[in-house]
Amino acid sequence: MKKTECPWYNETSAIKRAYDLGLIDKKWVQEFCWNGGKNCIRKKRFEKEGYVSPDYILPDGTEDPKLKNYYLNHD
């Protein structure tokens, strides 16, 4: 697969931080962030509504309890 990063996959990205910390599987960044943001609910909502998803919401729009616990205890 050719890697085309989403424009929002940078130091401000909760998904990038979670991946870099080893909190989420590589599949999330491969399927969404390194695929130009294709089908990413977080990206779609931000660009269309200006809505910033909580840090514990995965690219498919689901809530990750492990991420939620981490971010609620580390912010």
Image (cartoon, rainbow, N blue to C red):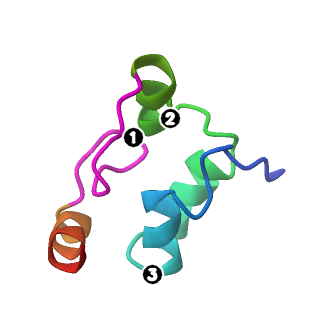
Q: Which residue is mark 3?
A: 22
Identity of the amino acid at label 3? Gly
Residue 18 is inside the magenta segment:
no
Q: Give me the disc on residue 43.
A: 2
In the figure, 69 relative to 30: above or below? below
Q: Nearer the viewer, residue 11 or 9?
A: 11
Q: Nearer the viewer, residue 71 or 31?
A: 71
Q: Which residue is mark 1?
A: 60
Q: Position of residue 13 (x, y in %)?
A: 50, 57
Q: Position of residue 40 (x, y in %)?
A: 50, 36
Q: Residue furthest right?
A: 2
Q: Is residue 12 left or right of residue 49?
A: right
Identity of the amino acid at label 1? Asp
Q: Residue furthest top?
A: 48
Mark 1, secondary structure of its residue: loop
Q: CA distance from mark 3 to mark 2?
A: 21 Å
**Would you identify the image quadrant in which residue 21 lies?**
bottom left
Q: Main secondary structure of the magenta part?
A: loop
Labels 3, 2: front one: 2
Q: Nearer the viewer, residue 27 or 65?
A: 65
- Residues in magenta, as a range: 50-64
